[in-house]
Each structure stands twice: as structure tokens, then as C-alpha cells.
Image (cartoon, rainbow, N blue to C red):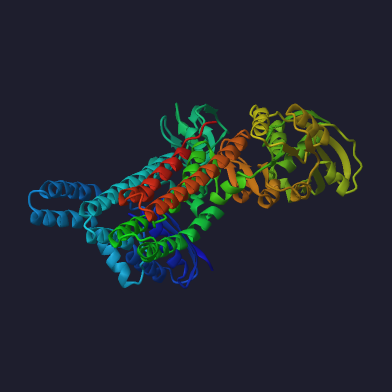
Amino acid sequence: MTSNYKLKLQGLNCAHCSAKIEEKINKLNGIKSANIDLINQTCHFKYDGDKSILVSQIKNIVAEIEPDVNVIDDLKIDNKEVNTSVLQIGIGLVFLFVAILLEKINVYFFNIVYLISYLILSIDILKKAYKNILKGEIFDENFLMSISTFGAIVIGENIEAIAVMLFYKVGEAFQDKAVSSSRESIKRLMDIKVDSARVLREKEEIVDPKDIKVGEIISVYAGEKIALDGIVVDGESMLDTSSLTGESVYKEVKVNDEVVSGCVNVNGILKIKVTKDFSNSTVTKILELVENTYSRKAKVEKFITKFAKVYTPIVVIIATLSLVLLPLVFNVGMLDSIKRVCTILIISCPCALVISIPLGFYSGIGGLSKKGILVKGSTIIDSLSKVNNVVFDKTGTLSEGVFSVVEYSNEETLEIAAYAESFSNHPIAKSVVSFYKNEINKDIVSDVEEQTGFGISCKINNDNILVGNAKLLEKNNINYTKADGSVVYVVKNNNFIGSIVLKDKIKVDSEGAISNLKKIGIKDISIVSGDNKTIVEEFAKALRVDKYYGECLPNDKLEIVKDKTNVAFVGDGINDAPVLALVDVGISMGFGSDAAIEVSDVVLMDNMPSKVSVAIKQSKKIINTIKINIVFAIFVKILVILLGMIGKTNMWMAIFADVGVSVLCILNSMRLLKIND
């Protein structure tokens, strides 16, 4: 049986090393798959072997490649990293200035002070390089930096050698700071978890939300976050849902209203009956979705990982050939050739690409999360950016999903329908039960079977009952009187006894959702529904949608989308789950069914269909930003390599082509944390 586990890799900031660690872990016996999340400094892995042995082996791998990284087998521990780079740079810089002053005064003392400065700045790099040489790893940035600066010293470029180490350390410090800043920004976006809750037992107790059971009552005071999902049983208040939906508009709640964890109670005191335990609460699900996004890598990430493995050896080969050919073929002096080769070696690290691409995806996903759009991995961003067909479910997606009964045949019809529909979570069923208002004795109802896309069959006091749409009656060969609109038909002992007509309202957000999709170039937009064709047609015309399909069963929806390419389906119900799982991108409503949320690729936490266009537009921006980073990094590196070969650049410029480009690409990726609608 395959299980999942996660380790904290505290202090891991090197993208290249991260890729090497991931590759080695994936080769361990018992590991099914492993992914290093550099942004969160975690290692996610699936395994079917002995966990304790695998954890020990992973610790050994990390110790070999990055000995300063601390592998923590408890994600609750979050000690702050101690960054010694600034102190190291400061001391090294002081000795460098002293060496420069001594160069013309006393060469002997100059060399001593210079050596001290060089060792202070490079000791950790030299140490890692030595260890890698013992392991046979010569294509490592530490080894290459060491060789480059040794070469500079050999040809008498002492100040340049130490300046290269200095700028390299400064660049790394900026790079680490940029990654840490991005990491903290994303953490702040996800700061929705509640560590304690007030539960009403014999007296009010403050406990860990994990210890609260379904059915218990919790109190939420003004200014506190709701810890668990539930139903309000006492009190009225306004909720700030911005941490979940990105919207600053307050939501009014009262008795019998559903509330979700992560929202802030603005005023008054609410008593809430818990309907989901901590592991199934909205907050937990959101955090799991965001934390696991890195386990689903886009094609470009996988490509860059493979590219990085061949890029450095190729540059080293070019440098080696240059060392031989420049003196022999182009009559370049040996000292000048060595200097040019050292310049080429410095830019042989692919860090700018390896770190900026996953950071681009992660920042983009974090920015979307802030807007209440949860994307389950960078593969989905890739698919979203290509969407050119959008298919909407109607009920609960483009409509409010809150039906009002406008007509019913007789009291018996209403009563039987209410008793049968009390076993369903469908919006129409809830509306019928709510309209009935009388108490329902479920003990007299038996043999309940909900037939997805049709309705419900059951027994009430031993009478055979059918409650559902026209297709349910046609399926059972029942003659009936057809009604217009959203209709619930009722059959008792194979005799049609009446119908209930309901109406639903278009969401205020739906018209904007359609127009915004058209603005970003989505021309193929459709509406599908199990509802009456006349009702669906009215909705489609009101929203200016040309394609619409009514009276659709789940299989019909599958038929509609199966031949479409680059299609996104937007739905919320259990009956939407099959098509959400099939399409290129499944988008579900955050207050929809658990089944729909589970199989979808994107979750809109605030149930606003207008967020579909935001998700598609931002995904295109994320992909474009990543492409810009790739082109920029490769162009600069190739340019500096060529300039280095002809002697038109120096080692300082090579440092910019390495860590400087990395920092610029990282900063460019971090712009994706902010989304402008």
C-alpha cells in the first residue's frame, strides 16, 4: 500500500542542489515518487517501504549534497534560519579593502591579508567543492567557482578573484532574500488556520480544533476566526470572508446559515454546530491544496530540470575546448585564455532557470489563492492558459441555486415531495423541503434511492413513490401532465398525482462572467443543465450565450464536452463530478458538493463564476512570465559566454550573468503574487 509523507528541509535555498536531492531520492528502493518543494523547503514523497529507513536514507542524501540543510521529521518545528552570509560578506569586505590599501605599501602583507579575505568569503564554497570532488561530482557550481578563482589567482588577477567571490556571495544573499520574501508572502496569503476554538461542553472550553467532534457547539466572538465548518444555531453577525475569497465585502449570517472555517466574525457572538471535523474543514482542504501544488509539475518545469543536467557539462566542455583552441588556433596568449575560460566557467550554473520557473508557478498560484481561486498544481496553470472553450453548468453555478416554489398541484403533492426530497442535497430538493415548513417524520420513509439526473424513488407508509423530473417518469412509463419551468413531478403507486414548479435566479455575477470571458478571447461558451430546455434557453439569452443544452443527464454532459479541445467545465454538483474529472480543466464552486471539489482542478472559493476569466487571464500571464525568464536567462548566459570567448567581458560580468540574472528572474516571478482584475 502506497503512503504519503513530508519532511522539512530547513535552510534549503539552492535550486540546483534541490534538483540533485530530488533525483537521488527518486532512485531509492521503496520510493514511488518524490518532489522537492524549494519554496516551502519540504520534501513530499510516496512510498511503500519502511518509512524510518527511507527517512534515514533521505537525511544521508541531503547531508551529502547540502550538509548545512537540516532535515526535520516534524513540520511543526519552524526555527528561523540563521543567515551567516551577511557577516561573512562584511568581514571579507573589510579585509579586501585592507588588502587594496596594502598592495602598494607592502606586497608581503598584501598577499597575507588578501588570502585571509579570500578564505573568509570562499571557505564554505571550497569545502563543498572538496567534498564533491571526493564523490566524483565535478559539474557543481562550488567546484566551478573554486576552479575559476584559482585560475584568476594563477594569472595574477588576485583582486578580481576575490571580487568574484564577493559578488557571488552578495548575489546569493540577494537570491536567498528574494526566495524567502516570496515564501513569506505566500505564507501570509495562507494565514487562515485557527489554532484554538471555544467549545461548549459542561462549560466553555478553549481547545485545539482537532479535538472538536461533529455535532458539538462552538462559540465565535467578535474579531475571532471560525475554526470549523458548521451551521449557525444562535446569533447574527457579519463575516469577513476576504481571507478565503479575496473579496472585502462582508457576508451577513443568521440562524440556520452555513458558515465555513477561516472567515472572521466581525460583530456579535455566533454559536455554531460543527458539521465537519478539522481534517475535512474548508481551511484544512485549502491548506492541503496549496501545499500539494508543487507535486504536480508542469512540462516546462520537467524540461528545465533535464536541461539543467546537460547545460553545465556542455559549458564546461566549451570552456575546456576554448583553453586548447584559443592559443593554438586564434593565437591568444595562455594567461588571457585562462582568464576567458574562468569567465565561461562562472556562468555554467543554471540556477536562474531552475529556481525562477517553479517560483513563477508558485507565486502565481499564491496570487490566485489570495483571490479565492485555488489551483491544484502548476500542470493546471499550463492547461488553463490554453483554454478556448468554457462550458458552464447552470444550477448553482450561473444561477443562485436557491429555488422558490411558485406553483404546486395540491397539498398531497407538496407533502410527498418534501418527505422524499428531505433525503437529497440537491438545491431543488432543499427548496421544496424549506417551502413545506412542516415537521418531517423520516421514520415513515424507507428504501430511498437517489437516481442521479432523474430524482428519488422511495416508500412512504408502504406506498411506492417517485419524485423527480420528466425523464424519471418517462423511464418508468408514467403518464403525466407536463408543466413549464423547473418542475418536480410526483408519482404515487405508479399514478401521477401532481407537480411543483420552481424558479431560480441568475447570479448577479454571471453576466459579468460571460462578458469577461469574451473580452479575453474565449468565443466558445456553452451552458448545460438537467433543467427544462425552456428555462435553459431563457438563461442563455439573458446572458448572451449562443450554445445551450437542456434536460442533460451526467452522460449527456460528457458527450457534449468529449470532442472539445482545451475545454474548461464549470460546475458545482455531484452530477457534475464525472465531467469535471474528464475535461482538460475542471472548475468547481467552493460551496458546491464535496465530490465536485475533490475531482476538480480549480476551486472558486466564493462561488463567483466571474473568477473563471481571472484564472484563465492570470494563467496566461504566469506562462508568459516564465517564458520571459527562460529567454532572458539563456540569452544573457549565451551572450556572456560568447563575449568571454572573444575576451570582451570579464569575470565580474560573468557573476551578473549567473546570480544577477537569477535575482532579476526571481523578482520578475514575484510580481505574480499580485493580481490586477
State the residue in front, 78 or 565.
565
Q: Position of residue 267 (x, y in %)?
A: 44, 26
Depth check: 647 or 55 in front? Answer: 647
287 to the left or right of 52: right
Q: Is residue 287 visible?
A: no
How many numbered badges does the structure rendering display?
Answer: 0
Q: Position of residue 424 (x, y in %)?
A: 69, 44
Q: Nearer the viewer, residue 504 or 151?
A: 151
Q: Is residue 496 left or right of residue 387?
A: right
Q: Nearer the viewer, residue 5 or 195?
A: 5
* Location of the C terminus (image quadrant): top right
Which image quadrant: the N terminus?
bottom right
Residue 523 position within the rendered picture, expressed as x and y whole percent measured from the top left: 71, 36
Q: Residue at x 7, y 49 (%)?
A: 105
Residue at the (34%, 48%) spot, across then down: 653
- Provide residue 350's location: percent of width, then percent of height: 42, 55
- Against 538, is 656 above or below? below
- In-image side of 170 versus 22 (left or right): left
